[in-house]
Structures are given as C-alpha cells and as structure tokens.
Image: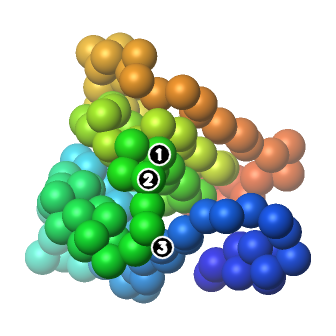
Amino acid sequence: MSWRIGDYLDQSDLDVIVVGIDCNEGLKRLDEYGPWKSNEMSDVFSAERQSIGGEGKEYVEFIVHELKSMIDEMYRTLPGETSMAGSSMGGLISTYAACVHPHAFKRVASISSAYWFNQKEIEELIKESDLSNIERFYMDIGTKENTESMTILHT
C-alpha cells in the first residue's frame, strides 16, 4: 500500500525522491517492524512461538547503513535531508529509527502508530533519546481508528 504517493508526486511540484520498502505480510510484518519482542498478540501466533516482533533493530540498521548509502550513491540526494514515515507498525518503526539514529533522519512521520505493540519500550526509548537533531516529527491518530485488535488483546 503506497498511500498513492506516486500519484500525488506526479501532480505536485515537489522535487523529492521517495523510496518505498515493501514489507512482508501477516506476522512477518510484525516481526520486521517490531523493534522489541512482544507478546501482545499471543492469540494470533502459533504454539511454537512465545513472542512476535524483535527484528526491527536489524531492519533499521539495514535502512541506515545499506539502503540509504546505496540511494545516496546512486541518486542526486541531499544526504542530510532524509525523512522516514510509516503508518501503524511503520509508525512504530519510524519513531524507533528517529530515536536510535536521529542524525540520519531530519523529519519523521508516525501515522496511526501501533505504539501499543511495544508501548513501554518505545516510551522509555523516547525519554532516553536526544532528539534535538529532529527538525519535525509528525504524529497523528484518527477519531475513527479501528479498535478491533485492541478489543481482542484484552479478552
């Protein structure tokens, strides 16, 4: 799901490079975008799993140390002007990336974030982080967010 960003950019005068990273589906997406392991959704993973998530650290390291470097080498970028954005679990991992690598991302957008997945850990990381290099941090949540998964979590 690209939020139709390509259509928007085709119609705008913005001079930007957008790199969309395809994610896995289902539980693997939660593994990749979850910086810490979580047992918040134990009702959806199989008996042989004790938790979900925990691969987000490696995902962010790949973005910062491999993907961003490759894009900066191949295209006329402004390396110090990089942003990161995501929704739901993408918002969680974007917030994590801003905290762990504030020098790499000047702007971050966290849209309808799934902070509940690692609520305690992300709050502690934010408190401990020096975010003075972050110029803008956009965060939102709608009044009509789907709460079905939250209801399932508490049953």
Q: Residue at x 32, y 17 (%)?
A: 130
| Quadrant in which residue 88 is drawn | bottom right
Q: Residue at x 32, y 77 (%)?
A: 74
Q: Amino acid at mark 3?
A: Val
Colour setting: rainbow
Where residue 78 is drawn, which disc sits there? Answer: 2
Looking at the image, residue 110 sits to the left or right of residue 52; the answer is: right
Q: Nearer the viewer, residue 102 or 38?
A: 102
Q: Amino acid at mark 1?
A: Glu
Check if mark 2's residue and mark 1's residue have beta carbons within 8 Å.
yes
- Label 3, label 2: how far apart the Cα atoms are: 14 Å
Q: Position of residue 58 (x, y in %)?
A: 16, 60
Q: On screen, 122 above or below 32?
A: above
Residue at disc 3, secondary structure: loop
Q: Amino acid at mark 2?
A: Leu
The residue that disc 3 covers is: 19
Looking at the image, residue 119 sits to the left or right of residue 70; the answer is: right
Q: On screen, 107 above or below 153?
A: above
